[in-house]
Image (cartoon, grey):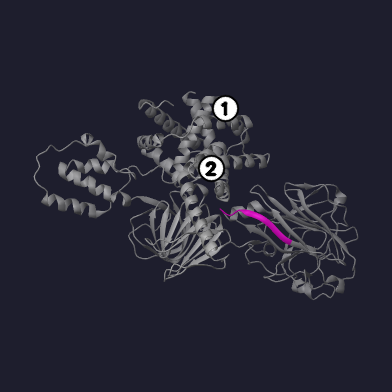
Amino acid sequence: MDIKEKTELSSLIIESLDGNITPERLRRLDQLLSQDPDAVEHYVRHLRIYSAFVRRGQIYFDTHKADIRNMELWDELAEYEKNAPTVEIETPEPEKMPVEMLKIEKGPRVINKFSLFSAFISAAAAVLFMVIYVKYVPTAASSVATIEDSVNAQWSPSEYPTKVGERLWNNEGTRWLQKGMVKIAFDYGAEVIIEGPAEFKLESPDKMYLSSGRLYSTVPARATGFIVQTPYSTIIDLGTEFGVKVDFDGSTDVHMFKGKASLIPGSVGEKKEGVEILASQAKAVNVNSRVQEIALEAGGFVRKFDSKAGLLWRGESLNLADIVGGGDGFGTGRQGQGVNPYDGAVLSEVGSLALPKHKKAIYQRVDEAGFIEGVFIPDGGFGRIPISSRDILSDCPDTSGSMNIPIMNGLSEILKKVETVPEISLQGQRWESKDSPVILLHTNAGITFDLQAMRKAMPGVAVGRFSSLAGISETIGDVGTRKDAKAEMWVILDGEIKFRRGVRADAPIAYEIDLALSEESRFLTLMTTDGGDGVETDWCLFARPRLILE
Amino acid sequence: MGDLQDKRRHNNEQHARYIELLMGNMDSIYRYIVSMVPRAADADDILQETSKLIWEKFEEYQTGTNFKNWAITIARYKILNYYRSMQRNKVKFSSQTIDAISDYLAEHQEDDGRDLELLQECLSKLTAKDRELIQQKYAQKITTKHLATRFGRSVSGLYGTLARIQRVLIDCVQRSLRSEGFIR
């Protein structure tokens, strides 16, 4: 292969590894590899170098930036020089230094520093330097991490870096974050969020010491082996996400959210047997190095934050009822607020609506509400109906095309006062508060959520699953005028029907929905249609509707 | 009670051995996986699943045999499942390409790591700007899009630059190996 072909191949490989390759470019890459053995050879060599770059301990990038800050080294050398015997010898040129001395280090190369002052010392002192340098190699100063982000961070007075983008070194001693939080990216891949007040020390590109405070660690598989040490334990990551809390007496709690890790109780130097912590487990180590099981604190740690996006996420799910109520999904929405499926208008404290029937199926964009892409009144009598800005549903049954209750977060106060409106309940439980969120989706109505908009607002957070109870309210039989009212409830993902069930007022059943989503999933639609018998008493509910985030 | 203590001790010993062997061979296992799977994020997921399956099957591993080869066999099983379960629109190679890569890897077993030592030296021969770009891309994990903005380049232009640097490093390592008498 010539230079041009090799460069083209390397470009295709890098795009592919990034996940940014177009289908056409992937076909080109595949064609090259399947037809040319030289291309396969270049490909494997490229991946070997890539692997060395991203795996810990293989390659050091700071080849000319290493700065010997350990002044003890200079002091010892100066002390020796005072008492060293006189030796007549030529001052050696840097290139004439013994080969053994240039091959001492396993860590960051400091060839430039070495050659610089070797011109100023006698040969005997140079031998001493070699001995001292070997002794100090394991703790040679190097930069090991970067401050990626911070929110309201206040540090103890320090001359060391504290600003976003600055590099952190392993010889800066204990850092004290008095308040706020900081996100630190270690060079070998681990990312750690530290919440103040906290005291910690960075030891290497894959190791840190937490004296007190709270941190959450995200370690991709290629950075496996990341270590967090505390006064009475050592946690070795095996490809995980976990939280660590250290109290002022040094006792440590470890909460495992993903993957697994090895927990070795005892302080440095003590020998204790390690135990495994698996996902959804939590363990505590006390000052006597005793390990015990504790309850997992699901919301106990900040797992993601992004100061620019205004994101702060402690692992909560996204509440879709809260979003219908004008909120951000984390509890800022209003009870009784909703959306008019006829025109997409956001409504607060509204009762029933008297709406004309559409002459054709219309999908209304809801620009105000952010995560809600649009709403519509489903009526298959128009043929295929739009259910998002992109998807069309061809299986919608012919409905009355009318509706008179807005899509709502719980019940508005106005509606609660109407005699024919029931206390909505499902599985024997009332649903209409922040702790029992519910989307009231009286027929005929549909609402489409934009998952991509959510991902954009929460960088680094994946939308993993949709979970909800679905059913018709159990209490309408007492107050509704149609005790045998029928309806259908639907869940549609990117135009594909994932859930479709008939429900009846006189035989209410609550269905558990648990739908996996992929990173390509875009539009999630919840829809209800009358069962062919009109809209009366069709109090359909999606209870505890949430998107489980990861 | 004695049996329970023995069982716990055995589990802890197995666990310690598992960690030692896995950590000692993780680089080789990762290199194999990332060579067979075109997308780095998918390779990470497969590495995680492989590590988990290695632990589940650890009782089957015979002490003294080649752990790396045994672990790579498990990785190969996970890679096969990955290709089988992939949706149509996902990034993946054709079966001819997978066979070609797999055959090459089988014929060219791991060496003594001399090429990685030479890579360190070749890295120091790059210009400071090229080295800074590589460090920000791979060590600091800044996305190509952000790097393009930082360096004032288009994204496609930056991919070209990264590819040039990569090609230069590969050629430098190969030249150095040939001059030392390693035939590659």
| Residue A301 seen anywhere in this rendered image of the structure | no
Q: Is residue A441 above or below residue A85?
A: below
| Residue B135 seen anywhere in this rendered image of the structure | yes
Q: Position of residue A292 (x, y in %)?
A: 52, 68
Location of mark 2 (residue): B71
Q: Position of residue A17 (x, y in %)?
A: 54, 39
| Res A374 label | none
Residue at the farthest top position: A2
Q: Is residue A416 above or below residue B72?
A: below
Residue A107, quarter of the rendered image: top left
Which of the pair B80/A391 is nearer the observer?
Answer: B80
Residue at the farthest front position: B2
| Lateral position of residue A356 relative to residue B11, left or right | right
Query: Callout 1, which amino acid?
Result: Leu
Look at the image and say whether residue A151 sits in the magenta stretch: no
Tag 2 subunit: B
- The local secondary structure at tag 1 comes to helix
Location of mark 1 (residue): A32
Q: Residue at x 45, y 34 (%)?
A: B166
Which is in the foreground here, disc 2 or disc 1? 2
Which of the pair A459/A186 is nearer the observer?
Answer: A186
Tag 1 subunit: A
Q: Residue at x 25, y 40 (%)?
A: A101
Q: Position of residue A487 (x, y in %)?
A: 85, 60
User: Which span is picked out in magenta?
Assistant: A459-468
